[in-house]
Image (cartoon, helix red, strand yellow):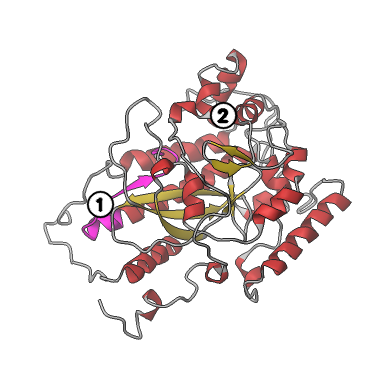
Amino acid sequence: MQTNPENAVLFDERQLGPYPDHLLKRTDSPTVAIPGPIQRRSQTENAAVRVRRGDCGAEAAEKAAGFLYRYPLGLAIGEVRSRMMSTAMPTGGNPSASPPDGRALPKFEIPEDPLALSRNIKALGYFLGADAAGICEVPSWGYYIDDGEGRPNRKEWRNAIVFLKRNDPTTTLATNGRDWIVDATAQRTYLHLTMITEIVTSYIRILGGEAESDNLRNNKTMMPSLIIAAGLGEASRMGIALNPFFGADFKASAVLTDMPLLPDKPIDFGLQEYCGRCGICARHCVGNALSHGEKQMYNGYEKWIVDADRCFYSTALLEGGTNCFVCIMMCPWTRPNTLPGDFESWDGSVETLIAAVDARAAELRNNGFVRQDAPGSKWWLGLSDKPEFKDIY
């Protein structure tokens, strides 16, 4: 496939998605030190798994097992997402060589240039509704050693196409981060990401490649490491990756493949220095699970230590809500003016980004850290009691 005026976008460096990520500063390595060696983790060691199996007590285990059943809307969205995954092509499967009426499928004119192929797949992700897309080679330690049930991963792919989807901004502005809508907000975003990754996976297979979706139900990788390697965020004090345009108010998924793609480089937008002096998230963490101090070396890399068990435990025992996003809601990077149109005139200046975040932090302080972004805009219904929905589906 040769470049021509009609497909020049596949070969140049113009902006593909809604946000101007092409203006970000790129680096050869992540902005945290990774001297190694890094030991790979088992999914059975995750805090969610430990709490649910009773490591933090029977009460927390029982409540953690029922996250999805606390609120009808979250259950409804989660049920649809599960059905979507159940009808998706099995892992490692291939599409039929012909449509149902027996006609042969037409063949694509596939670019030989990894740049063009990479931009084609990213553009597909944006076409399907992704807010950010990046590509990386999966670090060897980025894979879990098992599937959470003790079974080793069947295959470890070379590349990951990583997609970010924002949580609904209108709801973000109205929620306090710990009420009934929070889990439904996450389920809604994961539903979109499931659709994106399953379609992109099938597309790659139809092109003649092999691929596998890596999302909430079929999770093989440590997603923060992929987000950082794909140039979509930096490591934050919250223990999760943070995007320069919409903070940490998003979810992520990926498509894993051996297709010859062009990896993106990590980004540097000053987050390490900013998180080092801010600490708002730690001061307002409901479970006191976030570090108030400096970064430390952990398993061969530098990070702010998060007590994941304490985080998940306090969330499991949460009253009057379904999940906890308080750190994300209080983070000054999660600010109202972060829609694509707010960055139309941005020239790539880190100083401009930092000034906007500082202004948000000052606003939070002046309001006594009571968010007043959209008063009177809670559109969702509360619960008058606590019914159980486990037998509905």
Which residue is denoted by mark 1 in the rendering?
210
Q: Quadrant of the C terminus?
A: top left
- Label 2 sits on a secondary structure element that is helix
Q: Is residue 389 left or right of residue 319?
A: left
Q: Position of residue 165 (x, y in %)?
A: 52, 54
Residue 129 shows in this picture: no
Question: Between residues 269 and 326, which one lies in front from this camera angle?
Answer: 269
Q: Is residue 304 left or right of residue 117?
A: right
Write down the quadrant of residue 102 in the picture.
bottom left
Disc 1 and disc 2: Cα gap in Å? Answer: 34 Å
Q: Quadrant of the N terminus?
A: bottom left
Q: Position of residue 292 (x, y in %)?
A: 74, 38
Q: Which residues are magenta?
A: 202-219
Write down the quadrant of residue 302 in the picture.
top right
Q: Give the answer, above or below, for where 317 lies relative to 71.
A: above
- Looking at this view, name the residue that lies furthest to the top: 58
Q: Give the answer, above or below, for where 129 lies relative to 300.
A: below
Q: Position of residue 310 (x, y in %)?
A: 65, 27
Question: Between residues 305 and 195, which one lies in front from this camera angle?
Answer: 305
- Mark linked to residue 67: 2
Q: Give the answer, above or below, for where 173 lies relative to 120.
A: above
Around disc 1, counting alpha carbons within 10 Å, would you say few (fewer than 14), some (14 to 19), or many (20 or more)?
Answer: some
Residue 101 lies within the magenta run: no
What residue is rendered at 56% in x and 71% in y?
Answer: 23
- Amino acid beneath label 1: Glu
